[in-house]
Image (tube, rainbow, N blue to C red):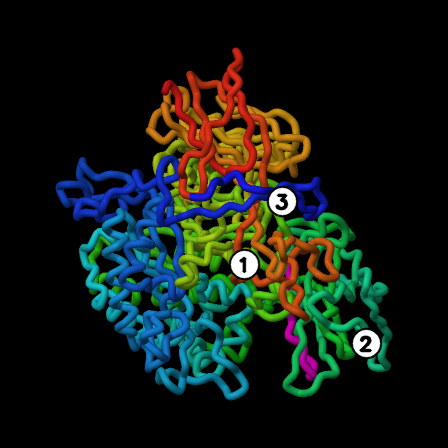
Amino acid sequence: MAPLLLLAFFLFLLPAPAQTFFPFSVDQDNLSGAADFSFLNQPLEAKDRLFVRDGHFFKIGPDLEPNTADDERVRFFGVNLAFGANFPSGDEAPRIAARLRRLGVNLVRLHHMDSSPDSTPANANSILTTGPYPNFNDVSVSRLRSFLLALKAEGIYANVNLHVGYTFRPSIDDVPALPASAAFPTQSKPLHILHPRLVELQAQFVRGLFERLDLKGDPVLAMTELNNETSVLYAHQNGSLDTTALGEYRTSLETAWNRYLQDCYANDDDLRGAWGPGVPEGDNILPDTWRPLEIHSGAAASMNTEPDGSVRVLVSTAASSGAPIVILKKVGFSVSVSESYTAEVEIRADLTPGQSRSVHWDVKQDVSPWRTVIGKNISVTSEWQKVRMAFTPSFDMDAIGRFGLSVEKCEAPLYVRNARVFTGGQRGADPSESLQASNFALVSSGENSTEGRTNDYLAFLANLDRTYNRTLLDAVRETNDALLPVTGTQMGFGGMMLIDAQRDLDFFDEHFYVDHYNFPNAAWDGRDWRFRDDSSLASQWSTFLDVAAARVSGRPYTVSEYNQPWPNTKGAELDPTLAAFASFQDWDAIVHFAYEHGRTWDSGVPHGFNLNGDWAKFVNAGQSALIFRWCLVSPALDSVRIPVPEPVRQRFTRERRNGSFAPALNLYYGYQDSAAIRHRVELDPAAEPSELPADALEKPGDTVDSDTGEIRLDRAAHIVTLNSPYAAGLFGELKDAPHSAGPLSVQLSASSRGIANILLTPLDGRPLAESSRLLLSNPGYTLRTQPGTGPAQPQRIVAYPGQTAYFTLEPDQANKPSGNLNGGSAPVWMESVEAAVNLRLPGPLRVYPLDGAGARQPELPLEHTENGWRFQLGQAPWYEITSGQ
């Protein structure tokens, strides 16, 4: 292998000191030594079959019987595979499985297998072909079976995802069509849950898939997920149910709704008594006049009032990816958390029929931090349309409210009228509606109905989700058995009433992303994208805490997707801090999204969400697996159980909170999300409302400590300190001040960027103070090479055109604002994070930088003092340390 310590140079990037970069890549197929975490796995045998017990995943043990003394708890550190990556060729399968084992992975989530059906089966990019659904691709099935055998041999389980991305085609799949003017929704969401014909076809898919894979009783099958990132509850809350359930699908929904009411009520009087009378609309709380346009630097726009009273706005800067913001707004009104409101506006533009433009509409604070109450994108056309948003605020606004329309993407004259925000307007049962006539109207997302009517409608939607889940669960059980753990969808895609919809299932799941890519123009345009360079330890730490607040007591809890995707310059912080936090919370699986989206196994460069090639995250991924799987961070000593009985779950969903668990619990109980740093947090649907423990209500100071004393979050400095007997780490904005975590002390050089993610773990299972072999990681962020440069230079991170809060990669193609997100040129350049380290450990110590294959490089010089062993970190992201040798 070529030496790691190669020529480096300086590059100015973002507002920061000059940074040093060096070429670095990982040789995944030859990774060995201290960087190889294969020792965590053993080939799977019959005793390793999984089942649910005591709210966690267990192996059945050597007696091959569940719920006996030899059952063994198991946690999962996993990765996703997506699309064609699920189907490696015969010679690739064992190689990729071995790679994942070296990374410490013991679970692979097989995701998006049903997406992008193959017209040519030999392409093997989907489990399906383009024939009538479900038409299986025999090539893909054969490859997947071989891959599962390879995973099994490497001690890696599989999570089989069922409905993820398939979009039904009415003319081919023999399902009802939508009206001619409407396209079938992407991934069929949520129509695949609503209509019996689509549900039955999915049950056929489930039976056919598992029959072909022949996995009944096979230990490699850990779990299965029925339905990715959607529910009818979610579609109602985000408004997509109203816009997609058209034609026969709407008729089916209306019929089911009225049958549900007939099952619930004996007569109309009982129903009207439960729903209560309607409430008339209150006064409009918006001021009469629009403010002058808020025109950001670089934009040009004008506003005038038309004879009919509408406001005309003309944006004269070119509507483009870099168009500066232009906001039409009314400000200065107040809203209260104790009231429900409806926002309403009518809007159109001078467009050719068939054309549309996107305008973002929101209600938010008009002062810092500009928190948003509610928002949505409006597809503006040439016709007047009335748009509504119903909302209950999660925070008060006292004369600082803003009703705003961001109009910069509409280059045609835009007209707005009848803007309103009002209380009341709650609909009960209309006089013309009756059980006998079966004509009770659906409750639209934008309307306020009485609490009784809304509660019934939400219970109906939850029942639709439950019926869908039960139908697919039955198909899973037919082709497997009762031990196989099954979940439905993710908690953030439906919220608290998913507890009701998924009551028949075995575990709960969630997804989260820090600094997800933003595509300002065309979705998933790999040369027009941007990111904020946020940190999960700073502005986005609340994401961890909100995910913790979605955990349901008594069931296993998994996070099957998470990422802080490249080229975020702080991304290396995510896996180790999440592993420590998840271990403290005693979750059951964390699954990085993704290892790979296709079969570009050997591209060797970072691309998109993929861990394959993202060497900044790769370097400490094995240590993260070790922390979580071996419980190197102790579970919390105490638990905060938050009561969420049915009325609370209904309120949460009525208020369209969806995935905003912690903010809602703060409103309902005074819950402080920092409680999840102090203690384990879980929702208890069986408990009655009660006061939470005092320290769950205590507002945090600058620092918050776990009740084990092993994790500290410095909220002001944006630093996480990890100090357990088995792991020590310092993560975040260390700057050039000295910091300590257990036996580890670090001081970054004055010339550094001031950000580091330094982690020390044992490799022999002993406490740090007793370990004879350890791994220290210190990855910097990575960049690819700008194509066409000579000598080779990094492809820089630059400001996205016309923006100061967004970044992207230096363009590599004319007339596009971004470098290619999905591929690029080697070599990969890693930031050198230079630091002085002191280890207070028994010696003598020896420290070896490792190259990209984990091979030792020349030993570092050490200084031994009464305070420990001191040495310098530089152009290497990981170091093997031996003690007493």
What numbered label is drawn on residue 539? Answer: 3
Callout 2, which amino acid? Arg
Q: Is residue 879 left or right of residue 470?
A: right
Asked if labels 1 and 3 touch by Cβ distance under 8 angstroms, the answer is no
The residue at 71%/83% (across/down) is 351
What numbered label is drawn on residue 836? Answer: none
What numbered label is drawn on residue 312? Answer: 2
Q: Where is 102 relative to 445, above or below?
A: above
The magenta region covers: 373-386
Callout 1, which amino acid? Ser
Q: CA distance from mark 3 to mark 1?
A: 32 Å
Q: Is residue 166 left or right of residue 574?
A: left
**Element assignment for label 3:** loop
Asked if labels 1 and 2 touch by Cβ distance under 8 angstroms, the answer is no
Expressed as whole percent of the image width and height from the top left, the position of residue 185 reads 49, 75
- Camera-nearest residue between 463 and 852: 852
Of label 3 and label 2, which has the lower sequence position?
2
What numbered label is drawn on residue 825? Answer: 1
- Front label number (3 vs 1): 1
Label 3 neighbour load within 10 Å: few <14, some 14-19, many 20+: few
**Element assignment for label 2:** strand
Expressed as whole percent of the image width and height from the top left, the position of residue 167 reads 42, 75
Of label 3 and label 1, which has the lower sequence position?
3
**Element assignment for label 1:** strand
Q: Where is 242 relative to 721, above or below?
A: below
Q: CA distance from mark 2 to mark 1?
A: 48 Å
**Whether residue 694 can be seen here:** no
Q: Is residue 3 left or right of residue 382?
A: left
